[in-house]
Image: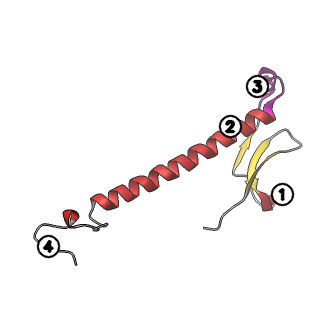
Amino acid sequence: MAEAVLEIVELDTGEVVLRRTDSSAGSSEPFVSIKFSQEAKELVNGQTGHLARFMISVGLQMVAKMHADAERESSTEEEQNGEDLGDDESAPPNTRLH
């Protein structure tokens, strides 16, 4: 999959979105959209843009961590299944690796 460059943007409507940088003309749907109710806006003293950016940033960090954990788990499973037979200890009994 090609690498996507993302941006967090506050729209004129007050909605904050995470989208591809090449979608500024509205060419694709945002990955994430956050819209606050009037009550929520009052609770955060109108700082919804900052709060939404923080929420999206934390979400992206969690996704990156989940991907890293999945990769680490996958490589551990491969080693446990003998797919990485780099030494004689992981080889099946009565075999020799050359």
From the image, tell me which residue sits under label 4.
95
Looking at marks 1 and 3 on the same chain, the residue that comes earlier in the sequence is marked by 1
- Place residue 21 in its image quadrant: bottom right
Nearer mark to the viewer, of 4 and 3: 4
From the image, tell me which residue sits under label 1.
24
Looking at marks 4 and 2 on the same chain, the residue that comes earlier in the sequence is marked by 2
Q: Which amino acid lies under the numbered mark 3 shown in the image of this protein?
A: Ala
Report helix, strand or loop for mark 3: helix
From the image, tell me which residue sits under label 2.
55
Report helix, strand or loop for mark 2: helix
From the image, tell me which residue sits under label 3.
40
Q: CA distance from mark 4 to mark 2?
A: 54 Å
Report helix, strand or loop for mark 4: loop
Report helix, strand or loop for mark 1: loop
Looking at marks 1 and 4 on the same chain, the residue that comes earlier in the sequence is marked by 1
Residue 9, above or below 27: above
46 in the magenta segment: yes
Q: CA distance from mark 1 to mark 4?
A: 60 Å
Question: Label 4 neighbourhood size at 10 Å, few (<14), some (14-19), many (20+)?
Answer: few
